[in-house]
Image: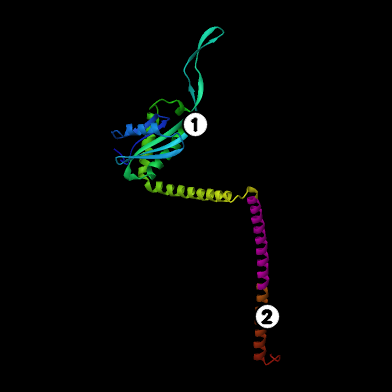
């Protein structure tokens, strides 16, 4: 038996579990399934606590799926024909992992995100859209096991990624907050554009002033160098003249 932190996981379409994996026995599978029935069909993450375990879900909001409606009897050129109607339905995917509560939330959430990425890459809206219950166990069950083991074996990497995502979210939050503050003050986009143009003009003026200042500093440095050089030459001449007794040095 492998790791014992993540004990059960599955991928579902709506309320239909397509693939699942566990090395343990217990009623956690039925509890996870019951929670699945109650999940809102919106993009979000949910965690439920029960008897020292967490039931973690990642829901991917509804995607279009073709479904067949009840067959109906119709007539075509006076002959009875059975016709299958078709319609478009919106379904959501749900990813679940049951974990020991002491493992925290980072590792389960990382598992859900990695599993979602791999499942979407492998199936997209194709086979997964029509697969029946547990029909993907053989194909995707080993992938669930692999991801569970990986996330438990690499907690430091998971923690670093979580920190980076948190920083990105914080930056986005600050940007949104700034925008909302601007809108609350009643400033218009045109004014923001004008301010941007002013900033560009100020930046250009700053660059011009910087170039002028550098040129001025260069000229001042050259003047100082010439003055120092003149003083040195004068000192040399004075020394030579004093040693030689004026201009009579032979």
- Residue density around tag 2, few if under 14, some if 14–19, many if 20 or more, within 10 Å: few
The image position of residue 86, as x and y in percent, is 51, 21
Q: Look at the numbered disc 2 and give the secondary structure of its residue.
A: helix
Q: Kindly report which numbered mark, 1 or 2, lies closer to the viewer in this rendering.
A: 1
The picture places residue 140, in percent across and down from the top left corner, at 40, 32
Provide the residue span drawn in magenta: 191-220
Residue 230's disc is 2
Query: Quarter holding the C terminus?
Result: bottom right
**Magenta segment, principal secondary structure?**
helix
Residue 203 highlighted magenta (yes or no) = yes
Q: Residue at x 63, y 51 (%)?
A: 192
Image side of residue 221 versus residue 129, left or right: right
Image position of 233 (left or right of 101): right
Magenta stretch: includes residue 106: no
Mark 1, residue position: 63
202 shown above or below 159: below
Give residue 207's quadrant in the image.
Answer: bottom right
- Quadrant where the N terminus sits is top left
| Element on which disc 1 rests | strand
The answer to whether mark 1 and mark 2 are in CB contact below 8 A is no
Please give the name of the residue rendered at 66% of the width and 76% of the height, measured from the top-left corner.
224
Distance from disc 1 to disc 2, alpha carbons, whole Å, reads 85 Å
Give the left or right position of residue 168, taking residue 15 as reference.
right
x and y percent of residue 64 in the render? 50, 29
In front of the other: 218 or 12: 12
């Amino acid at each position: 038996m492998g790791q014992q932190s993540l004990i059960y996981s599955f991928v579902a379409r709506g309320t239909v579990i397509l693939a699942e994996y566990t090395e343990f026995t217990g009623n956690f599978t039925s509890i996870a399934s019951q929670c699945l029935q109650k999940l809102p069909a919106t993009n979000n993450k949910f965690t439920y606590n029960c008897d020292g375990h967490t039931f973690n879900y990642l829901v991917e909001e509804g995607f279009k799926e073709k479904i067949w409606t009840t067959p109906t009897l119709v007539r075509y050129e006076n002959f009875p024909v059975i016709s299958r109607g078709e319609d478009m339905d919106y379904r959501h995917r749900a990813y679940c992992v049951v974990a020991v509560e002491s493992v925290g939330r980072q590792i389960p959430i990382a598992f859900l995100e990695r599993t979602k990425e791999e499942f979407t890459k492998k199936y997209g809206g194709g086979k997964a859209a029509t697969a029946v219950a547990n029909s993907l166990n053989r194909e995707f069950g080993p992938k669930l096991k692999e991801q569970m083991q990986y996330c438990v074996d690499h907690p430091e990497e998971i923690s670093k990624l979580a920190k980076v995502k948190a920083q990105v979210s914080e930056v986005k939050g600050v940007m949104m907050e700034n925008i909302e503050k601007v809108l609350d003050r009643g400033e218009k986009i045109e004014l923001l554009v004008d301010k941007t143009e002013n900033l560009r003009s100020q930046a250009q003026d700053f660059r011009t002033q910087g170039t002028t200042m550098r040129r001025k500093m260069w000229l001042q440095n050259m003047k100082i160098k010439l003055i120092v050089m003149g003083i040195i030459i004068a000192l040399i001449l004075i020394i030579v003249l004093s040693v030689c007794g004026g201009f009579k040095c032979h």
